[in-house]
Structure formats: structure tokens, C-alpha cells
Image (spheres, helix red, strand yellow):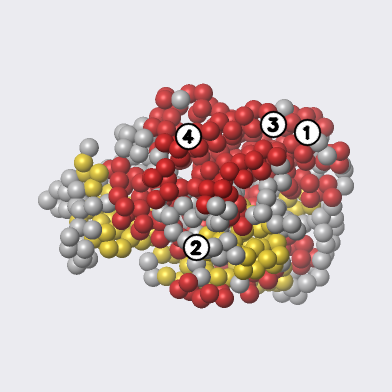
Amino acid sequence: MDNQINKDNTLLISPVTRIEGHAKITIDLNQDGAVRDARFHVNEFRGFEKFCQGRYFTEMPAITPRICGICPVSHSVASAKACEMIMGIEPTYTGRLLRRLIHLGQTISSHALSFFHLSSPDFILGWDSDPATRNIIGLAQHSPDLALRGIRLRKFGQEISERITGKKIHIMGIVPGGVGAPLSEENRKALLGWIAEAAQTTLMGIDIIKKYHEQNRDMVESFANFPTLYLGTVGPEGEWELYDGKLRFMDINGKILNDQIDPKNYLNYIAERPIEWSYLKYPYYKPYGFEKGFYRVGPLARLNVAAKMKTPKAQKEFLNFRSLNGGKPVHGTFYFHYTRLIEMLGAIEEAEIILKDPKITGQETQTQGRHNYTEGIGSSEAPRGTLFHHYKTDATGKLTEVNLLIATGQNNPAMNRSVLEVARQYVHGKNVKEGALNRVEAAIRCYDPCLSCSTHAIGAMPILIEIKDHLGETLHVVKRG
């Protein structure tokens, strides 16, 4: 059904929103009704760093998981690493294993939520299907087995956190020096029992997205396809690494610009600039400057910068992904979904390896330490991309400065560009169909942004899309949620 402009030049529609946080999109049209500009606005205020000042630094691994219920582990891991730099200690072997396992579980849970709950209704039910049912409920009615499998896959990821830390979200078990408690043999066996089903569901997801690629090749390849730089964390041989690696920057042609960078040196390569239309800053690659230095992080970026995966099933899919553009970086934004599934498969395989390590149930889970230095920097690969926690303390260990560089913030320039590209492709004139606006929103969903992570505000989760003419007058308003 067409969304016609009424006499007040406004239109209201209300399907379920499928992003996390507050945002709006403004689309400016020229005199001929063509898209001139489009912007992604984050209209929440971010204040988390400020109210952490004055707290003792070792409190941060317990405070920062409250930033987000989707990726609390990444925040706690990065926070604990920053604390360990301040203390001058390393976690125990078992403590590091358990952290890796919890982190993999969070990756599985978050990626399952993104693909099966938030994004798959578009390409399973149809971009132009009824927005009232184009969601997980509609998916459950259309494909009940797939919807249930997606829910259980997310549950498996959360189960890993719960069986190690006692909580599914806002975990408390990651501490400076390792983790607070060991994994029992009973819980180890219970988690191993999930592996086969989790892998099977992920492979089903991969089959779905690959078939969609085949059947909609032109749409997939043209959907917000533009070159950017990429940042991801890799191991010593360039392998995909989520927990503990070094930074790698890659240019638009696949040339490695910087490699094996210690995350503590991130400020040598990344700068941020505020923008007038959003509370979310614009980060950029410092050597290229603000105009040319925007880059992407997250699943697409990680698989572009990586030389290989660490496990056989994920490696097979990785090689297929890398062949899509002749071995060069894949720039199409829609491929975030495929790379997200490849990562989930790799995380499940690696989780099985860790669960079979005989030391995973060891009792030495934490190294003890004290306040020795005044600055600490920790990093991890959150589901949405590279995350940095940077703390400075006074002589007593109280925090004087806190900087959290969030993955969604680093993707902000690219999300704005993606919205513009998709709007130009699908929005024509003033009578805009709901399905076209859904595609504009989908450009954001590819990145799976966590605006609560990036801005930390309380409230509902609407998206507001405004279309303006060349004089700046609002012609069309679409409000969701």
C-alpha cells in the first residue's frame, strides 16, 4: 500500500522497530523529488563515561556490563583488560579460557538475535510484506521451526554465560586477573550437549542467506555497496580473533595499512569528531584525516581484514566469502549478514574446542594484584566491532578519565553513507511506499547497531524518518514504534 502524503504533508505508520536504541533518518529531496541527502541521527545523550569518574577502577568490570544487555561480556572483558594493565598482571590460563568461552557465547547470542529475530523477516517474509507481521512473531507463524531454532541458538549463547557466571545478561563473573569462579564438570558437559544443534541451526542460516544471494544477486550487490577502510583484530598469523589479538587496518583495495598494532596504541590511529546532527561522534582513521579516513568495523570488516578462520567449517565459508570479490575486500553492506553467520559458526566450533580443553574446569581462575599504574587500555571484538576501554586514575585508584570507543560509533559514518545510498536507490518522489522505507531502515540493521551501547539513554525505541524538500520543508514523516 502506498504511503500517500496528506494535506499536512505527514504520514504515520507503526510496525515493530528492529534496531536497539533511539534514532531517526532525515531524507532531503531536490526540486524533482530525487534524494539529495540522507542522515542517520542518534538522538540520545551519552553520559556513561562521566558518571564512572570517581569510582575505584576495579569496579568497572562489574559496572560496564550494565551499558548493554546484548554485549555485556565484551564490555566486561575490555574493562578487565584495562584494569589488568593498571595492575600489571595477566589472567590465569583457565581464567583466560573461561573468558574466551563466555565471549564466544555472547557472540553467538548476539549474532543469532541479529539474523533470526531482527533481519531475517525482511528476506524470508518479504521487504514489502505487512509491517505488522514482518517481525519475529510473523516469522514464527511462517516458519515455526526456523524461528524456534533461532531462539534456541540465542539461548545457547546465553547459557554459556549463565553456567559460568550465574547470569545470562549483565554478567558479574569477569574480574581483573581472570574470572571469579570455575566451571563445573556438570556445566561443561551440558554446554557440549548444545554444540551439534547450534552448528546445525547456523548452517541453516547460512543456506538461507546464500540462496537469497543467488536469487537476488543484483539487489544484494547494489545494496549500499561503497568502498571504505576496515579495522579488525587478528592473531599473529592474521587469523580471525575476537578475544585477544592485535589491530589491523586495511584500505579499500585490500592493502594492509597497519598490522599487529597493540590496542593500547589505538589513539595513534583513531580520532573522533562531533557532528551537529547526532550525539554519536564520527571516528576516523587519523593518518587519512576526517574527510577520507572513515572505516568500518564488525563482521564484514573482520572477515575482510582476516587471512583465515581458525576452524574448518568456518574456514570453508570464509573462502567462499573471500571469492565474492576476487580476494579483495567485499564492500557490499548486505554481506554483513553472511559474515555474521560465518563468525557464529566459527564461534561455535571454537567453543567446542575450549570446552574439551582439560584445564577448562581448573580451579585457578584468577590472578591477584593491586593498583600499580595510573592508566589502562583494554580491547575486545564486540559482536558489532572493535571496542576500546581507556581508563586513567589518580594515585588512590579512583578514575579521573574514562573513554569508551564503541563499535557502533565507529560505524556511524558508514551507516550514514549506507542510508544515503539505499535512499537514492529506492526513494523516488513524494509518494513513498512503506517497503522502500523498510529498505532504508534495513541499511542500518545490516550493522546491527547498539545505540544503547553508544549513547546510554532511557526510553522507548522509535525510528523517525523525515523527508524534506530542497527548501528544508518537511514533506513526509514516518514514525515507527
**Distance in Å between CA atoms under marks 2 and 4:** 26 Å
The residue type indicated by label 3 comes to Ile
Label 4 crowding class (10 Å Cα cut-off): few <14, some 14-19, many 20+?
few
Q: Is residue 98 left or right of residue 147?
A: right
What residue is pinned by disc 4? 211
Q: Amino acid at mark 2?
A: Thr
Side of 286 where 63 appears, left or right = right
Nearest-to-viewer mark from 3 and 2: 2
User: Please, what is the three-letter code of the amino acid marked with disc 1?
Assistant: Arg
Secondary structure, mark 3, is helix
Decide which of tag 1 and tag 3 comes sooner along the chain.
1
Disc nearer the start of the sequence (1/2): 1
Judge by depth and name the residue closer to the eye, 476 or 447: 447
Residue 110 placement (x, y as % from top left)? 57, 43
Marks 1 and 2, how far apart in space? Answer: 42 Å
Q: Would you say the residues marked 4 and 3 are in contact, meaning their CB atoms lie under 8 Å apart?
A: no
Which residue is denoted by mark 3 in the rendering?
195
In the displayed image of the protein, which residue is found farthest to the front? 326
